[in-house]
Image (tube, grey):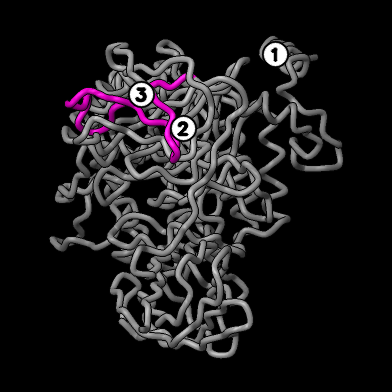
Amino acid sequence: MKSMKQHLSWIVIMGLMAAGLVVAAEPSLPNPYAGETPEQRDVRMKWWREARFGMFIHWGVYSVPAGTYKDKQIGGIGEWIMFNGKIPVAEYREYARQFNPVKYKADEWVRIAKEAGMKYIVITSKHHDGFALFDSKASDWNVVKATPYGKDLLKPLSEACQRQGIRLGFYYSQAQDWNNAGGGVCGQHWDKAQDGDMGEYIRKVAVPQVQEILSNYGPLAVLWWDTPCGMTRAMADQLIPLLRIQPGIIHNNRLGGNYPGDTETPEQYIPATGYKDGRDFEVCMTMNDTWGYKSYDQKWKPVQTLIRNLVDIASKGGNYLLNVGPTNEGLIPGPSIERLRDVGQWMKVNGPAIYTTTASPFKRLPWGRCTKKLTPGGATLYLHVFDWPADGKLLVPGLKNAVQSATLLADGTRLTVKAGPDGLVLSVPAAAPDKISSTIVLEVKGPLDIVQPVLKQASDGSLSLPAAEAVTHGEAIRFEGGQDRDCLGFWTNAKDWAQWDFTVTRPGRFKVVAEIAAPGSGRFQVTLGDQRLDGKTPNTGDYGKFQRIEIGTLELMGTGKASLAVKPIPEGWQPMNLRSLSLVPQN
């Protein structure tokens, strides 16, 4: 006979099935979303796509050493101190005796997220050190049994989120576990206590713990897997059916076993053009240089960077998951709170240009970014202006639509719009409403009609082909923004390649110059039609140290469209970062 709890759960599931949130998958298939239609997926992903902004929380025993072991500052991110410091299991477990977050106030954390404009929270229920923030029957290495605090940390947060209308998700490290025997370590064990069978670990720790967090808390909106070291399909097949416990839950691409999940998870970088085929993605980033708390990490990003990251990500159709790393007392660091407060002030004015928006219809904008909402009669374009025009004229390049209205989002001031040969020209006030990012609301009629700009030669014939403008082909290669790189990176597969399409207005012979960073010397080729140049990467010693090299000479024959490609030469290929190519006229 079903318990009352089971009976109510079944009623909820039936209701969600009627709404299209639960998929009736084949019973023989582990994945509960195996039979999901595109329409069902759209219903399930709707809240997530509208939210755009969430809080990541990395919290655990690692906040006790806070980056220091035996009076030595350990390099790397804070939550990896056990791994990077090769701390023995028994010694690391002693830190739990000092983990006593008596200042933890779940309602305060949720309020901070909500006032920042965040719509959901994802917290580490168990990170790679294996320490669970909940009372687990599968392992005593948890906050209730191993610490003086002795209380579940997730339940108060779950209740606070429900009270304040914020969705909650749990991060869970399903494969990597440095304390429970048999857990993967993404490398060699450094303590015999870690030895064991990973298959047994999955069965006896990971599966029951995932079942615990999905059964004992809720409703849960997200399950955030991480680092599938050693995960096989058979192991993943034991975990993925558990998603049925929380109907409609969203999970990411880090489970392993060739399960793609619902979302891509670019970490600490923003993909240049989003993902192909409309793939949902969520950029996770830190506010300083660590996820878990490190007492001496004071490299805080300025508010301008955080806001512009949010705008940039939304303009590409993605979500921004911004991290905080609380202390062992249960406090979110002051610099994090200050920045979130400032972001929240900006969101109070500009939130409508972020929430429920979709990606920009423009390939690039010289002064900022754009988000959009389609309307029955046309579209609303939100122009996020980073660089306010000094002459009071803002060009929206290539836009041909008739304009219904143009206003400043901050105060509703109406703007004058004129059509020009290169697009629409908006007359704007002398001073920007916001120095970081000002929003103009442009209501246009009819289907969007935009002539996209193309790369073309400068008046002297020179041509710059930056990494951000490349069309990439392959699984690994992608644009890597930030950290003074702005390059094509992750180029580990010799089958991946890149191309640039451009317009030739001044034919002639051109010297090809590349800006490359690589820790080793490899071979590649540059092609233009039937012409080919073989290049050799310089050994700069580091992926962040760039050097300009001359590759050879190519000829642009005739005006019109042209395409240049860079491809690895498989024999002798070594990964490289490519920042740009330049074509320099040879008269």
Inter-mark Cα distance, 2 to 1: 26 Å
Q: Position of residue 2 (x, y in %)?
A: 76, 15
- Residue at the spot x=62%, y=41% of the render? 278
- Residue at the spot x=38%, y=51% of the render? 268
Q: Amino acid at mark 1?
A: Val
Q: Which residue is mark 2?
A: 135
In the image, 308 versus 132, the foreground residue is 308
Inter-mark Cα distance, 3 to 2: 50 Å
Q: Residues within 10 Å of mark 1 (few under 14, many from 20)?
A: few
- Residue at the spot x=55%, y=60% of the render? 471
Q: Amino acid at mark 2?
A: Asp
Q: Position of residue 474 (x, y in %)?
A: 61, 64
Residue 431 located within the stretch drawn in magenta: yes
Q: Which residue is mark 3?
A: 440
Q: Are marks 3 and 2 in contact (CB under 8 Å)?
A: no
- Residue at the spot x=58%, y=33% of the render? 449
Q: Nearer the viewer, mark 3 or mark 2?
A: 3
SS label for mark 2? loop
Inter-mark Cα distance, 1 to 3: 42 Å
Q: Nearer the viewer, mark 2 or mark 1?
A: 1
Q: Which residue is mark 1?
A: 12
| Residue bounds of the magenta highlight | 418-443
Q: Position of residue 46 (x, y in %)?
A: 60, 24
Mark 2 or mark 1, which has the lower sequence index?
A: 1
Quarter of the image for the N terminus: give it: top right
